Image: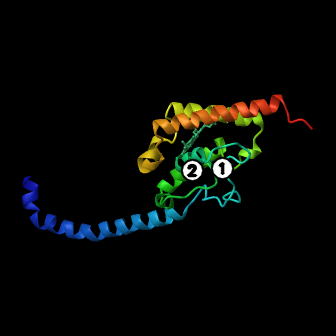
């Protein structure tokens, strides 16, 4: 305390000297941030399936398809509409990694590329994540409240997964007569 009083002069000039370097630090931070935002390790992949319908090959009602459009396809299809924050690091890296992992597990733009067993497995998986309210992920529905499913919509999706599973099973057991 005593020292502060004695070194009065020096301490008074200190903040003035500090200001320019704070300015340089801040602009340096902005620059690093701007450059970091240009770095897209996972890239906003250009898709040749962006126009593909959802669940090609499946029998799906327009109503269920609309639920998927609203709540799931930003991550699980190639119809991703990248939100503004997906352009800005570090959010961009999390979003890109999310979409990449999500598409790897289930890409409903390429549903027709799965065999019947793969489709049935994913249909069961969809019912489970909806039932347990695991999807859409919480971090997503906070930013996209419109993606939250109502109780009725959950039932509708789960019933559709059952119907589609049954349809696939029956098609396998009794292939259409030649
Ligand atoms: C924010 C992106 C995002 C959204 C939106 C989203 N998911 Fe996911 N989903 C993921 C990620 C990431 C994974 C992989 C999780 C992991 O790696 O453990 C996943 C995994 C899954 C799986 C597991 C697939 C498997 O391998 O069994 C299912 C099923 C699924 N999601 C269904 C849905 C459904 C249905 C919706 C819409 C109601 C939805 N998801 C919305 C990101 C998302």
Within the image, what quadrant is residue 175 found in? Answer: top right
Residue 81 vs residue 148: left or right? Answer: right
The outermost residue toward the front is 177
Looking at the image, residue 91 lies above or below residue 123: below
Residue occupying the point 62% across, 36% down: 160
Within the image, what quadrant is residue 164 found in? Answer: top right
The residue that disc 1 covers is: 54
Residue 163 vs residue 88: left or right? Answer: right
Count residues near mark 1 (Cα–Cα under 10 Å), then give few for <14, some for 14-19, many for 20+: many
**Camera-side residue of 2 and 175:** 175
- Checking the image for residue 113, the label placed there is none
Label 1: state its secondary structure. loop
Label 2: state its secondary structure. helix
**Camera-side residue of 122 and 38:** 122
Q: Position of residue 57 (x, y in %)?
A: 74, 45
**Camera-side residue of 95 and 36:** 95
What's the colour scheme?
A: rainbow
Residue occupying the point 46% across, 66% down: 34
Q: Report how far apart the C-alphas of labels 2 and 1 lie in the structure.
A: 8 Å
Whether the residue carrying mark 2 lies under 8 Å from ligand 1 is answered with no
If the picture is divided into quarters, which one holds ligand 1?
Answer: top right
Q: Position of residue 125 (x, y in %)?
A: 62, 33
The outermost residue toward the top is 173
Asked if the residues shown at circle 2 and circle 1 are in contact, with their CB atoms under 8 angstroms apart, the answer is: yes
The residue that disc 2 covers is: 69
The outermost residue toward the right is 178
Within the image, what quadrant is residue 13 found in? Answer: bottom left
Q: Quadrant of the C terminus?
A: top right
Tally of marks: 2
């Amino acid at each position: 305390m005593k020292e502060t009083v004695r070194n009065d002069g020096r301490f008074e000039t200190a903040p003035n000297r500090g200001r320019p370097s704070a300015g340089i630090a801040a602009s340096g931070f902005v620059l690093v941030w701007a450059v970091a935002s240009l770095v897209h390790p996972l890239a906003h992949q250009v898709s040749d399936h962006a126009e593909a319908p959802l669940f090609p090959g499946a029998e799906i009602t327009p109503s269920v398809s609309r639920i998927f459009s609203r709540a799931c396809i930003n991550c699980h299809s190639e119809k991703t509409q990248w939100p503004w924050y997906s352009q800005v690091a570090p959010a961009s890296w999390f979003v890109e990694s999310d979409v990449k992992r999500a598409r790897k597990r289930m890409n409903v733009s390429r549903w027709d590329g799965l065999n019947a067993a793969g489709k049935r497995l994913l249909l069961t998986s969809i019912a489970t994540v909806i039932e347990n309210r695991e999807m859409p992920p919480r971090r997503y529905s906070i930013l996209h409240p419109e993606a939250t499913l109502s109780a009725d919509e959950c039932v509708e999706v789960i019933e559709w997964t059952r119907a589609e599973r049954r349809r696939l099973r029956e098609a396998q057991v009794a292939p259409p007569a030649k």
